[in-house]
Amino acid sequence: MRILIVEDEVELQRQLREKLKSGGFVVDTAADGEEGLYYGNEYDYEAAVIDLGLPKMGGIDLIRNLRGGDRRFPILILTARGHWQDKVEGLEAGADDYLTKPFQMEELQARLNALVRRAAGYASPVMSSGPIALDTAKKELRLNDDPVELTAYEYRVLEYLMLNPGRVVSKTELTDHLYEQDFERDSNVIEVFVGRLRKKLDPFNPIRTVRGQGYRFTEQAGEGSG
Amino acid sequence: MKSGIQTRLLLTTTLVLGISLTLAGLVLDRSVRLSTLSGAEEQLRLVIYSMMGAVETSGPDVRVPEPLPEPRLGQPESGLYAWISDRQNRLRWRAPSAVTGDVSGPAPGPELQPGEFRFASEPTSGDGLLWLSYAVIWEDPEETVLTFHVATDWTPFRATIASFRRNLYVGVALVTLLFVLAQMIAVRWGLRPLRTMAQEVREMEEGRRQRLSDAYPSELTGLAENLDRFVAHEERSRARYRKAMEDLAHSLKTPLAVVRNAMERIPDDPRALLEEQLDRMQSTVTHQLSRASVSGPVIVGRPVDVALLVERLLRALGTAYRDRNVAVETDLPGPFEVRGDERDLMEMLGNLLENAYKYTRSRVRVTGAVEESLVIRVDDDGPGIPPEVRRAVLDRGTRADEVQSGQGIGLSVVAELVALYHGRLRIEESPLGGARLVLELPGALRRDG
């Protein structure tokens, strides 16, 4: 999952980036509103974390501009003042949740996960499709209630596909959302991850290959059906 | 209450006017009476002179031949009478008008020296006559001393005086009335700028006006300008203070967040202690800053639409707490307004409503009523707050270092804010099964129609 962080305080920005990276997110950072707007318009994100007190363009204006440009990813606002005025204005501008500084990193991660999952249409932290249940809080996969071991990258591939059910996701898109920008891109690696995932999901086969385009996660019917 | 300027001015002028006009009336009355009397005396003197010209004496005989010098002396009860007496007070002649009727002769008085007049300036009680007597040495061989007495009926003079007096009283009353009326108009007109000012100040309080108008008389411009300056200064310093608080919040909280996150790399042993201390710092900073940024009741402020605030907050909370699937009902009969600072009200209501969202199972109900105060009840169907801890929940903010982050910290902030507004916050049991928070704020704006 790719996340945009817009925070002007250098140290906090660094901490956020590291924490979220280690939590399995791909993170882009911007230090002011204008840079944030550029990133937000240029790239595709699963969610954004936006501080309200930003230089050049305030957080509220940034959110308005993003929403005005039809960018729909969930936005979590950070506010140091913690006034209701700020929270309400932020939410009215188009944000989806708020967090008051100082905050716990775990809280931020949990909120982000919830926002992303909610945006994909899942009501609970466990994204389930028939027998397949992916617990985004514990980062666990269960098949018919039996736990299945996944590596971090396998988890991320499955999570991203399940966040976009029924939609064809290209290998490039997958790479974008799984790796940092400067990462060596090799579509073979993706094929390897998908191949391993399919084996682990056997006998179910939710990941279909769309020739020349990419992969599609197909919704699974009730328990036990293939 | 002190009497108004208008009453004072009116009372003073009416009193002074009343006293001076009464005195003027009395003086006028007296001088008219005196001049009437001296007119009568003059008339009588003329009658005596004309009688002296006409009188004839022969020995003891004294007579005034026809035609009498004053025709009224010949008519009985004509109101003008005359007598002539000698030194021994014996009556020697009397005019035909005095012969019949009830008119008695001249009253015996002290002897008059020849050439001396005596005027009885008060009508003698019995006959209602004014008397003038004159003694003279008659130039005959015996050098007789004759005393002429003339009397005139007082009644016509009295009638003149009475009618004058009537006119005088009516006139004085009318003049008094006129003066008082003029005074009232003058006072109202003179005080009108003050009333205008009071009205404009009220409009400023209600936020319908930014500053006083310029149309004040020179005596009041100084006051008006000072008032304007005071209000502007108050607004500026409030804004400055708020800005300072926000800067402080930002410059304290961001480093706190950084420190907290950086501590993860520290080994467990000192970290627990550091975290505990950091928690205390954090909650103190949070609590004190949210307290300090409250402006409290405002001198000048537009009415805040509480129903609209609640609506905005509920929409925002509905977004942030989307996963909770809370069913919300509101009943805030409009117009639902209170005078205060919008941000303060938002803090109070935001914390109250968020508290309900946090602890409810499925329902939140917001109801309100405009009574003496603005009353807002927030109900939820959560676990509720047991009676024995209610006080503690609301009092938590009394000592900063006792403040713990977590449950209900927002409520103690609300309680303090509400106290600043001279309002009340109560915790009750909700008919929905959870907690009911009742917020009472004075300064509700009632609008008719």
Image (cartoon, coloured by chain):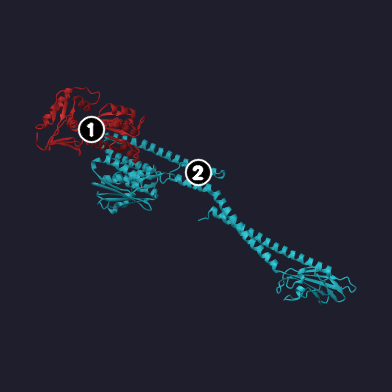
Chain colours: A red, B cyan
Q: Are marks 1 and 2 in contact (CB under 8 Å)?
A: no
Q: Nearer the viewer, residue B216 or A212?
A: B216
Say which element carries label 2. Answer: helix
Q: Position of residue A6 (x, y in %)?
A: 31, 31
Q: Amino acid at mark 2?
A: Leu
Disc assigned to residue B227: 2
Q: Nearer the viewer, mark 1 or mark 2?
A: 2
Above or below — where is B33 with respect to B260?
Answer: below
Q: Nearer the viewer, residue B236 or A218?
A: A218
Q: Position of residue A215 (x, y in %)?
A: 16, 27
Q: Position of residue A152 (x, y in %)?
A: 18, 30
Above or below — where is B159 with respect to B330?
Answer: below
Q: Is residue B48 left or right of residue B343?
A: right
Disc assigned to residue A23: 1
Q: How many C-alpha atoms fall within 10 Å of the one at disc 1: few (<14), some, or many (≥20)?
A: few
Of all chains, the one bearing label 1 is: A
Say which element carries label 1. Answer: loop
Q: Amino acid at mark 1?
A: Gly
Q: Residue drawn at (56%, 51%), measured in percent from left and top?
A: B185
Q: How many marks?
A: 2
Q: Is residue B198 visible?
A: yes
Q: Is residue A3 left or right of residue B424?
A: left
Which residue is farthest front? B67
Above or below — where is B223 with respect to B21?
Answer: above
Of all chains, the one bearing label 2 is: B
Q: Quadrant of residue B327?
A: top left
Q: Is residue B372 left or right of residue B120?
A: left
Q: Position of residue B415 (x, y in %)?
A: 35, 48
Q: Is residue B398 visible?
A: no
Q: How many C-alpha atoms fall within 10 Å of the one at disc 2: few (<14), some, or many (≥20)?
A: some
Q: Distance from label 1 to label 2 (Cα)? A: 60 Å
